Amino acid sequence: MAKSQQTFNKLEKEKKRKKKREDKIKKMLARKEAKESGELVTNEFVYVDYNGNFTDTKPDPSEKKKIIASNIVLGVPKREDVKTEGFIGKVNFFDHSKGFGFIIDPESQEKYFVHISECIDEINEGDKVEFDIMKGAKGMNAVKVKKK
């Protein structure tokens, strides 16, 4: 005689499926009986409170915030004027062979990239410099760099 084609795992999976179906039918019948006898009470409404959570109780109208439609602004908010001129900093690193370096702003401790083509005066590490900033490909770059 040949062996059965069904493996142990297949038999176990089939048993689980059958048990799940039976449990589902039992729950459905229990709900049906409870509904007929009046034990099952279903909430017709679900409320959402002012924080966005579901509740069974109606939220208190005194907690509701008043929103004036004219105060709603659609679109991108306007950017504040960002200072781009008159920065003073110290050259943290500068490589003359490669032609670039970094300047640190002592107020914000922000590092700005500087290329040799943007230097008015020749700069070295440790020099105090005055510069403007401009948005570059990878962030803010120092431009119009001159010794102070």
Image: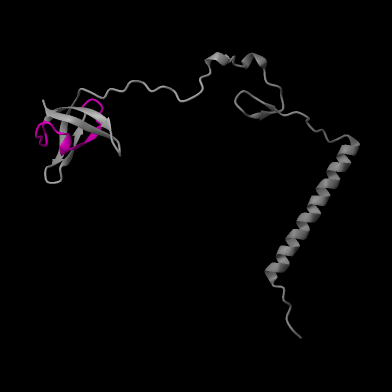
Q: How is the image coloured?
A: one colour
Residue sitting at the far front? 117
Q: Is residue 47 left or right of residue 68?
A: right
**Residue drawn at 72 percent across, 73 percent down:** 6
Image: 125 above or below 4 = above
**Residue drawn at 63 percent across, 29 percent down:** 53
| Residue 137 part of the magenta-drawn span | no
30 or 122: nearer the eye?
122
Residue sitting at the far right? 37
Q: Place residue 106 in its image quadrant.
A: top left
Residue 85 location (% of width, % of height): 23, 23
Region of the chain picked out in magenta, as a range = 106-127
**Residue drawn at 76 percent across, 55 percent down:** 20
Query: Which quarter of the rendering shows the N terminus?
Result: bottom right
Image: 33 above or below 72 = below
95 or 55: nearer the eye?
95
Image: 57 above or below 35 = above
Q: Place residue 2 in its image quadrant.
A: bottom right
13 or 115: nearer the eye?
115
Image: 144 above or below 3 = above
Q: Place residue 120 in its image quadrant.
A: top left
Residue 35 location (% of width, % of height): 87, 38
Residue 99 location (% of width, % of height): 15, 42
69 or 32: nearer the eye?
69
Residue 66 location (% of width, % of height): 59, 14
**Residue drawn at 72 percent across, 76 percent down:** 5
Magenta: predominant secondary structure element? loop
| Residue 124 part of the magenta-drawn span | yes
